[in-house]
Image: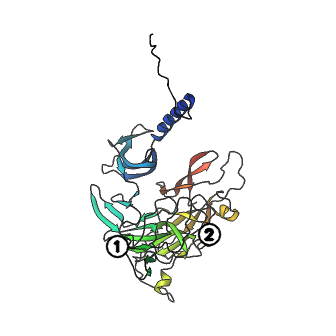
Amino acid sequence: MENAEASPLKRSPRGLDENSEEEYSSLSTLLQHFASIPTVDKAWTFKSTSEKGSQCMFSISQPNLLANQNRRYILSSHISKGSPNGVIFEWAAFPIEMPSGSIMVPSPSGSKLLVVRNLEKGSTTTFEIWGPSRVEKEFHVSSSVHGSVYSDGWFEGISWNDDETFVAYVAEEQAPSKPVFTNSGYKKGSSSDMECGSWKGQGDWEEDWGETYPRKREPAIFVINVNSGEVHPVEGTNKLSVGQVVWAPASRGLQQYLVFVGWPSDTRKLGIKYCYNRPCALYSVRAPFSKSKDREPGKNAIEEASPVKLTQRISSAFFPRFSPDGKALMFLSAKSSVDSWAHSATQSLHRIDWSIDGKPTADADIVDVVPVVMCPDDGCFPGLYSVKFLSKSWLSDGSTMILSSVWGSTEVILLVNMLR
């Protein structure tokens, strides 16, 4: 009897048929193609030493599907004029990968680069000052001073001052001490986390802002001296969740001021990053390293260090940006969302005149640059929606600001004359 040689049967995994397998294979291939496309997150331009074109540095991210996180890397390029209406990009040979949790902020002159490295929770935060070819300084800030530096794009704020000696930034406030217990009950005094036979309680429950901020402590503002590594907190913000800090233009005196956004933290925190209907305001405070030469009569040091609310006449103010000449402070507002409780209504753009010689005042006049558009005509400007600001938003004329906004179903670039 001849044994017929039977062809092996192709079996699909249990619960899957051949059509399902082909569909999954096609979809996974499509996903891999999409994941291979990098995204430009940030870009910086620097003057070239040869005065022919400019240097540019790009922060790029790309999904790592197996690790379920993003790869981040830096790619440099030299940009020069090509044809009358075009430019030539001369790219570096290869990009350089950046560790997760790293933040990069060039100084105003482009001669220094600040790299902040957030390591594991509870460990130190590293601040590196880079020059053109090497690391010039490195400082380690203990978790007893503050936690991780915010890099979320909302509370986030890292700002160099004009003479590049200080950097203001937003980080998680210092963790409160927790009660320690042993087999004998509560133990008085401090104790190491790793001490045998003891454990730490959780302490009082603290509400977070939800969404992308679970288990993150309140944001607070700190200033680091980039020459000595000394770190000071900004006082007087205990009842606020703070963020988006920037340096005010340098005054002729010894005082330097910071401008930041504050959200009331003594109310329920029901989400913030995607909820524009949370009341907020702009505040100004004297930087902790600055010295007061002349104290106002009737004011003590604590009163002078207290924040000044700049936008008392409006229910929402965020993303502060100073004009190149330092005479105007621009900001966005979601007052229509706050007043109506809609999550994302039309936004508006405003200006406050800023006196370089004087101190910030709480009764400054607010100028409407782009007001709320309630009922736009067909094909006309619909108002500002989901606006994105650049850290340096100004064109070379010093009065035109560039920003992006949603217009219908697309995101467009807008040019706004801020000083008219």
Between 27 and 341, the one lying in front of the other is 27
User: Which SS class for mark 2?
Assistant: loop
Residue located 50% across and 58% down the image: 153
Q: Give residue 374's position: percent from left, percent from top.
A: 71, 56
Q: How many marks?
A: 2
Q: Give residue 209's position: percent from left, percent from top.
A: 56, 64
Query: Quarter of the image containing the C terminus?
Result: bottom right
User: Which SS class for mark 1?
Assistant: loop
Mark 1, other Cα within 10 Å: few <14 / some 14–19 / many ≥20: few
Mark 2, other Cα within 10 Å: few <14 / some 14–19 / many ≥20: few
Between 49 and 168, the one lying in front of the other is 168
Residue 53 visible in this rendered orientation of the protein = no
Query: Quarter of the image containing the N terminus?
Result: top left
Q: Can you identify the residue that label 2 sits on?
A: 268
Q: CA distance from mark 2 to mark 1?
A: 35 Å
In the image, is residue 6 above or below residue 34?
Answer: above
Which amino acid, by three-letter code, is at mark 1?
Glu
Q: Give residue 184's position: percent from left, percent from top.
A: 43, 80
In the rendered image, the residue lying farthest to the bottom is: 298
> On the image, which quarter does residue 341 sit in?
bottom right
Residue located 44% across and 13% down the image: 3
Between 416 and 241, the one lying in front of the other is 241
In the rendered image, the residue lying farthest to the top is: 1
Could you tell which of marks 2 and 1 lies nearer the N-terminus? 1
Q: Give residue 191's position: percent from left, percent from top.
A: 38, 77
Q: Can you identify the residue that label 1 sits on?
A: 230
In the rendered image, the residue lying farthest to the front is: 1
Which amino acid, by three-letter code, is at mark 2?
Arg
Image marks 2 and 1: residues in contact by CB distance under 8 Å: no
